[in-house]
Amino acid sequence: MSGLLHRIVAGLAITAILAAGSVGATPPQVAQAAPAPSSSPSSGGFVAAANPMAVEAGLNVLRRGGSAVDAAVAVQVMLGLVEPQASGIGGGGFLMHYDAETGEVTAWNGRETAPAAASPSMFLDENGAPLPRADAMRSGRATGAPGAMAMLEAVHRVHGRLPWNALFEETAVRAEQGFTVTPRMADQIVRFAATDRTPDARALFARPDGAPLQAGDLYRNAPYAGVMRRMAAEGARVLNTGPIAEKIVARTTAAPYGGSMTLADLAGYQPQQIPALCKPYRVHIICVPSPPASGVGLLELLGLLERTDIDRRGPADPQAWFLFAEASRVMYADRDRYVGDPRYVQVPVAGLLEPAYLDQRARLIGERASAVPPGAGKPSGAVLAGIDMTHEPAGTTHFVIVDRDGDVVSMTTTVETYFGSGRVVEGFLLNNQMTDFSFNPLEKDGAPAANAVAGGKRPRSSMTPVIILDQKGRFVGAVGSPGGNAIPAYVAKTLVGVLDWKLPMQQAMDLPNLVARGGDFNGEVHKFAPGVAEGLMARGVEVRRGSGEESGIHGVMVVEGSLVGGADSRREGAARSLEPET
């Protein structure tokens, strides 16, 4: 083990304990891998995102000499226009940043916060029963104080190179001139926006005659252009104070099921720099954000897989997928029980990643899948919490950016459900992130839910943006995905494909998705190699098609000094590099 790797491993225990903390503890402001000599890939830059217009916006910033963070601002605001069903300025996210000069890896939390008056019973009806999910998701109670742009502004103050006000005009012009609606966007407008439950969204995405926009239509959003120019001039605070904030409060407090958002809730929002958890996986180091993100779940899953021989198998081997499924079930049992906002609940991050605990949990992986799903373990530092099976629906995106200096952004961003709450302010959609909390403050076993609602609390997130380092702390790759609760599984599958099976990033992304959580095995059974589905059945695993959001993996790897990435073929994304300067 190299000296640097030893320091990272030793530092992990300290960082993880700090991340777990005690209730109400404030996480440290900086967490990093040990500095390494600068070693940038020979490329002018790289962007992978869920829409080609967002990719081009990011590349244009890089062409002007902008940093990865500068480009991330441009990509996010463009995605809010051209992929509004997935993310936007009214939502939140998590960001991982790698500094090529120092080797520093930092994590940022732009997750939305609950209004101060939010209570554990806010998603219960007058009889104490949970509201129907469809009602809750479109309610005013569903929206938390948005954090994506405040987070990006905070990161930009540290790592920005171009002026903040130089990052919005391309999107503003595109919003005014319009763009062609894609088949995916049109399909999701019809399915999720053009409904009686979402009159705001229905009007925003309608033709002049009131019919839903169709593929090939030109879509313009002049109010969004206005917000872009105001944000360029005044900063992200335009969402938290002043006329736009007043409109957010008005829409969230309106019936049905009006919420408790106030101007003080918006004005008081603060993004957080949180510990970056970095843990070795075989010969690489995987860095992820700490809770309330699900990075610790991904690290636990990889730790379990490291105790198997999956690396000596391959995608055509049913035993490889069996190991992946069973390790996933063990991870989700722990993640669902223990992960929440560490300011409110004690998250046993260090205990979940202890080698002895991983050894113990790996022994649950037998020769056949048990009909009874594995329960949560008892890692050191754990405080009893309820079994939380919160449903985390679709409406998320991920992008990866590398700039000319080798600095990297890996960011997952969301409005929660497709088109968020469906409520609109000045051309952008409000999130319904509060429905990521447990609807019931007590779980079926009577224990309090770690992910119960509380005023000012951030809901648990499955978002898991990743930075990959080598043993010397140099950048090797970055990856992430949308997908609700399936995100850790989608990202882990891709990491196994790239790091264990030595596949190019694009081929690893294109591997079949398999999500095993509790008693459910969902995935793309039709994409498995011949004999895999039958081999899984023989081991007690029946994979069913459907259920949940498809992946939208975007990533990049350094291959022989060049950036080689990919965009998930299940969506409409793109991955492009800039030519190196000569």
Image (cartoon, rainbow, N blue to C red):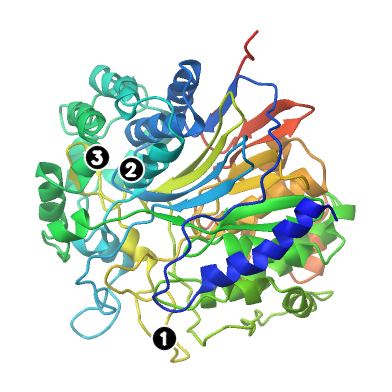
First-in-chain label (3 vs 1): 3
Q: Residues within 10 Å of mark 1 (few under 14, many from 20)?
A: some
Residue extending furthest bottom?
446
Which residue matches tag 1? 448
Front residue of 266 and 413: 266
Q: CA distance from mark 2 to mark 1?
A: 32 Å
* Residue 100 can be seen in this image: yes
**Closer-to-camera residue (234/85):** 234
| Image position, residue 378 (x, y; %) | 63, 85
Please tell me which residue lies in front, 220 or 205.
220
The kind of secondary structure element at disc 2 is helix
Query: Label 1 amino acid?
Result: Pro
Quadrant showing the N terminus: bottom right
Sequence order check: which comes first, mark 2 or mark 1?
A: 2
* Residue in the image at 26% along x and 79% along y: 121
Residue 464 placement (x, y as % from top left): 55, 54
Q: Nearer the viewer, mark 3 or mark 2?
A: 2
540 left or right of 34 in image: right
Tag 3: amino acid: Phe
Mark identifier at residue 428: 3
Q: Which residue is at the front of the view, 204 or 247? A: 247
Outermost residue, right direction? 312
- Which SS class for mark 3? strand
Q: Within the image, what quadrant is residue 226 found in?
A: top left
- Of label 3 and label 2, which has the lower sequence position? 2
Q: Which mark is residue 149?
A: 2
